[in-house]
Image (spheres, helix red, strand yellow):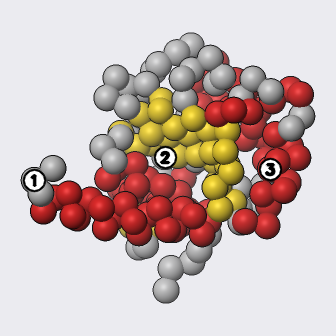
Amino acid sequence: MAAFDHSYYQGLLVEIGNLKQFATFIPNQDKNKLFLNRKLGEVSSLTVFYSFTYDHILNKARTIDVTWFNERKMPEMFFEVEHSTDMNNSLLKYSELRDFYSKFFIVASGIREREFQSKLSVNAFSPIKSRTAFMSYEKVSEWHSETFKITGIEKGFGF
């Protein structure tokens, strides 16, 4: 039985990104953590973070739990899994990335959604508010299952 911990949800998000044809990245500090008996670094498609901007911004971005890159090697979506940590740190990272056309997600237990709304409502985060969303663990699991189903059906049609 898999432990439903931080790396488990990172792995689900990486698998969804891979199925959706994004290039996926896991931070170096997490590459050796296990997801269903595989290292997260083996599940993600990238070993090197794309250099899409200045180094001082890249240094923050490459620590985000899961990044999906589009075909132009630009960040499409960022996911921070907040299993037991403070969301403010993640929101600050996202604020540094506000000039990029990316979506930001905080992934956590559903009971933390109110906390997310409260922190996001702070005026300092207003530039990213419309592009930042909360995603519960339950919704990530559901998204993962449904993405696998849809991908299987699409393969049957030759997609």
Q: Amino acid at mark 3?
A: Phe
Instruction: Please name the residue shown 34% across and 47% down the image.
Output: 20
Inter-mark Cα distance, 3 to 1? 41 Å
Q: Which residue is mark 2?
A: 26
Residues at circles 2 and 1 in contact by the CB criterion of under 8 Å = no
In the image, which disc is placed on residue 116?
3
Q: Residues within 10 Å of mark 2 (few under 14, many from 20)?
A: many
Q: Is residue 152 left or right of residue 11?
A: left
Q: Nearer the viewer, mark 3 or mark 1?
A: 1
Secondary element at image label 2: loop
Secondary element at image label 1: loop
Inter-mark Cα distance, 2 to 1? 30 Å
Inter-mark Cα distance, 3 to 2? 23 Å
Secondary element at image label 3: helix
The mark that comes first in sequence, 3 or 2, is 2
Residue 145 or 9: which is nearer the viewer? Answer: 145
In the image, which disc is placed on residue 158?
1
Q: Amino acid at mark 1?
A: Gly
Q: Is residue 153 left or right of residue 75?
A: left
Residue 97 picture location, percent across and down: 64, 24
Q: Nearer the viewer, mark 3 or mark 2?
A: 3
Instruction: Please name the residue shown 35% across and 40% down the image.
Output: 22
Residue 40 picture location, percent across and down: 44, 57
Residue 127 or 88: which is nearer the viewer? Answer: 127
Residue 137 picture location, percent across and down: 62, 65
